[in-house]
């Protein structure tokens, strides 16, 4: 396990809490630099309190040799890493502005350039299709993880009806960026819809903006980290 990856993962947890994506729940993981068939994820705890020493490593079956209690929903991460070799980081959250888009027919679409990555469309996961009526909505076994990964397909994000969402990317900072801007876009889209007919970014505009923004993620990460780790902002 790389110490620096664990440190970055702890920072990602703090940033996502500070930016309103995670609260006492939700989690973020990163694929291991040393073994692509393993990933790093904090132990079962509130994201704001995660330190590098709380990070566990897992195989793609969601198993760890660490005897501390893991997150129940680690199969979200394990099965997406198995299905998507291009994915190097995964954020699972219940961020509030996104929830309404998971329970209605309203498509989540980019209303500003910062969310251009949404222009190709987001996936939808319906847990009742595999779990039937009466699940607790959680991805609590590998079979549900496989179904979620299949629903995600090649998309950067999947809405999980009545639960939350999952956001993926080819780097940890970009996955964090996408989770933050998906939440911001959802709130702005809701506001725009209330004003009238919305003119969304076209698919080509979204693609162009996403390409530009992917080169700027480091600047955002540095600011988010400073904000997250300044005591008066906690
Ligand atoms: Zn969840």
Image (tube, rainbow, N blue to C red):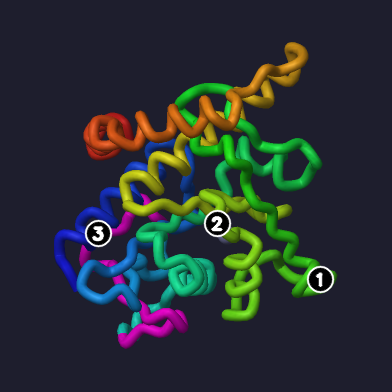
* In this picture, residue 26 sits left or right of residue 170: right
Q: Which residue is mark 2?
A: 154
Q: Is residue 62 magenta?
A: yes
Judged by depth in the image, the label closer to the viewer, 2 or 3, is: 2
Q: Which residue is mark 1?
A: 134
Label 3's element?
A: loop
User: In the figure, 168 relative to 215: above or below?
Assistant: below
* In this picture, residue 24 sits left or right of residue 188: left
What span is in magenta?
46-65
Report the residue at 54% width, 29% height from top.
204
Precedes in sequence: disc 1 or disc 2: 1
Q: x and y percent of residue 138 in the render? A: 64, 67
Report the residue at 47% width, 47% height from top.
22
Q: Quadrant of the N terminus?
A: bottom left
What separation in Å lies between label 2 and label 3 (alpha carbons)? 31 Å
Judged by depth in the image, the label closer to the viewer, 1 or 2, is: 2
Q: Which residue is mark 3?
A: 51
Precedes in sequence: disc 3 or disc 1: 3
The reply to whether discs 2 and 3 touch (Cβ–Cβ < 8 Å) is no
Could you say which is closer to the camera, residue 120 or residue 10? 120
What separation in Å lies between label 1 and label 2 (alpha carbons)? 29 Å
Q: Residue furthest right?
A: 133
Precedes in sequence: disc 2 or disc 3: 3
């Amino acid at each position: 396990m790389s110490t620096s990856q664990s440190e970055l993962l702890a920072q990602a947890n703090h940033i996502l809490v500070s930016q309103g994506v995670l609260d006492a729940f939700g989690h973020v993981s990163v694929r291991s630099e040393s073994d692509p068939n393993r990933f790093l994820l904090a132990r079962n705890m509130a994201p704001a309190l995660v330190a590098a020493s709380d990070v566990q490593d897992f195989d793609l079956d969601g198993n760890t040799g660490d005897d501390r209690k893991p997150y129940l929903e680690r199969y979200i991460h394990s099965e997406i890493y198995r299905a998507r070799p291009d994915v190097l980081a995964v954020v699972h959250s219940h961020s509030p502005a996104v929830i309404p888009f998971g329970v209605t027919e309203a498509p989540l679409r980019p209303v500003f350039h910062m969310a251009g990555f949404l222009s190709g469309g987001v996936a939808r996961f319906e847990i009742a299709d595999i779990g039937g009526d009466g699940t607790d909505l959680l991805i609590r076994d590998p079979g549900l993880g496989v179904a979620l990964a299949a629903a995600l397909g090649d998309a950067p994000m999947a809405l999980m009806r009545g639960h939350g969402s999952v956001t993926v990317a080819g780097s940890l900072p970009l996955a964090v960026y996408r989770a933050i801007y998906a939440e911001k876009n959802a709130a702005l889209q809701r506001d725009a819809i209330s004003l009238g007919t919305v003119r969304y970014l076209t698919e080509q505009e979204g693609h162009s903006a996403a390409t530009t923004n992917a080169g700027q993620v480091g600047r955002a990460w540095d600011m988010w980290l400073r904000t997250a780790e300044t005591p008066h902002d906690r």
